Amino acid sequence: MLEDWGRAFPGCEPLAYRMRGRLPARWVRFHNLPDSKRYPDDEDEFAVVLGRQNRILGELLGPGAQAVLLTTSCIGPFDVEAGDHERLLREIDPDAKPWRSLAMHELEEDFIAPTYWHVFAREWTWRAGVFDPVLRSAAMNQIVNIMILPPDCRWLFHPYDGGVDLILESSAERDRIKAAHAGWLSSHPDGL
């Protein structure tokens, strides 16, 4: 699974927060809510978040396409709520299989040794709403380093609290999807 990762994302570990810096010509960020509001307060706002994210996923995938969900388990001395995080990941994707492990204390100086991120993967069949539990949890910052991508790694969709980062196949594809959803972009000059 995901044999094309290295070709599609050269020099990148599966760390979503690093992707925009490594592949800026292919990156775009969309905000979840109007006026760049970070967290939804009620079900109406969750409907906006899920509507936007499902629309983008639907445009990228198409009906019945295969998508890989990457989830990340964080293990280290910093995570006092690890039990809740692990329980939520098991509820969201109980059949996920180990894909990669990252020694975060070797990759980032801010991490205390030993800190490991274990990335799990599972292939899903796309339909609108299939990832809603994941998208809701990411929107509330209950889970981190979530990524959705096709098996051939043409693009990457990273939901987080506040929005979604996309790494597209090319800058032309990035420009196309950026123009299609211009109202969801940040007004900040650097796109954050």
Image (cartoon, rainbow, N blue to C red):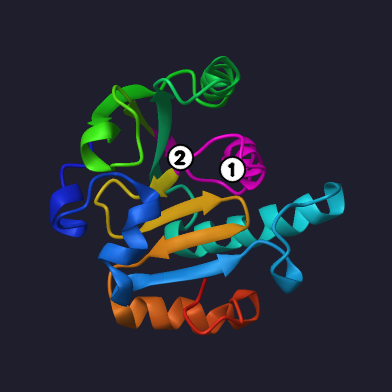
Give the magenta part as a residue range: 123-146
Q: Do the residues labelled 1 and 2 touch (CB within 8 Å)?
A: no
Residue 89's x, y, as percent? Answer: 52, 24
Residue 75's x, y, as percent? Answer: 40, 21
Would you say residue 129 sits in the magenta stretch?
yes
Can you tell which mark lies on residue 125? 2
Quarter location, residue 117: top left
- Residue type of the residue flagged with mark 2: Thr
- Disc 1 is placed on an element classified as helix
Can you tell which mark lies on residue 138? 1
Q: Is residue 19 above or below residue 170?
A: above
Q: In this view, does 182 lie above or below 143?
A: below
N-term mark: 1 or 2: 2
Relative placement, left or right, of 131 versus 103 is: right
Between 188 and 183, the one nearer to me in the picture: 188
Would you say residue 48 sits in the magenta stretch?
no
- Residue type of the residue flagged with mark 1: Ala
> Which residue is rendered at x = 59% and y = 23% of the image?
88
> Which residue is rendered at x = 83% and y = 49% of the image?
41
* Total labels drawn: 2
Residue 177's x, y, as percent? Answer: 47, 76
